[in-house]
Amino acid sequence: MKESLFYRIIRPFIRAFTYVFIHPKYIGLSNIPKEGRIILAGNHISILDPLVLISSTRRNIHFLAKNELWKGFKRIIFSHLGLIPVDRNKKDTFALKEAEKYLNSDMVIGIFPEGTTEKGRGIMPFKIGAVKMAYDTKSPIIPFAIIGKYGLFKRIKVVFFKPISVCSNLNKENDRLRQIIINAIKED
């Protein structure tokens, strides 16, 4: 699997937009390796979150995103960005296998295990997909926490943690991943 040329072309514009209008503070960027398979997994507070993550690294992030977004012209753009559509109403084995292909090619998967934005409800339960992919492909997970609120005169902070490996007890690992993020938000 090849990295997307479209992604490389559009990334500088996304980065410029992010730095001018959002101006996030990044902590722990050194925890994102420059090569090799990784899963970036964290909380989801806004539709702007993927832009902030894209701006955090030069690596091409292949996000899993709800399949409802694949309508009209967006379908073409999202496909060229290497996004993976997910049917959130069922256990989507196709999306999981597609993401695993990227990981097996030493690429980066971005996932928001809540499956939707928090909408002020706080961190919701995590779906099992991130830890399942990590276990199946022996990929490390880089947990991240997005802290704060987007808006005029507000600033968000994104904290990237050291990579974690998962064992076969996926429910326990899913709880551990979620707890890392909850603790980071509480400490802020």
Image (tube, helix red, strand yellow):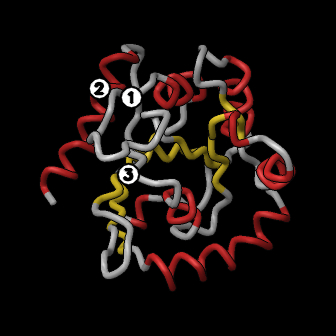
Q: Is the N terminus in the top left, top right, bottom left or bottom right quadrant?
A: top right
Nearer to me, 52 or 60: 52
**Tags 2 and 1 touching, CB below 8 Å:** yes
Q: Is the C terminus in the top left, top right, bottom left or bottom right quadrant?
A: bottom left
Nearer to me, 84 or 166: 84
Residue 2 visible in the displayed image: no
Report how far apart the C-alphas of labels 2 and 1 lie in the structure: 8 Å
Q: Secondary structure at mark 2?
A: helix
| Mark 1 neighbour class, 10 Å CA radius: few under 14, some 14 to 19, many 20 or more | some
Where is residue 64, by image quadrant?
A: top right
| Mark 2 neighbour class, 10 Å CA radius: few under 14, some 14 to 19, many 20 or more | some
Q: Residue at 63% of width from left, 40% of height from top? A: 65
Is tag 1's residue or tag 3's residue first in the polypeptide sequence?
1
Q: Is residue 69 left or right of residue 155?
A: right
- Above or below, comparing residue 152 to residue 68 in the picture: below
Q: Secondary structure at mark 3?
A: strand
Residue 36 tag number: none
Which kind of residue does numbered mark 2 sit on? Asp
Which kind of residue does numbered mark 3 sit on? Phe
Q: Residue at 37% of width from left, 42% of height from top? A: 118
The residue under label 1 is: 126
Which circle, 2 or 1, is nearer the viewer?
Answer: 1
Q: Residue at 77% of width from left, 41% of height from top? A: 70
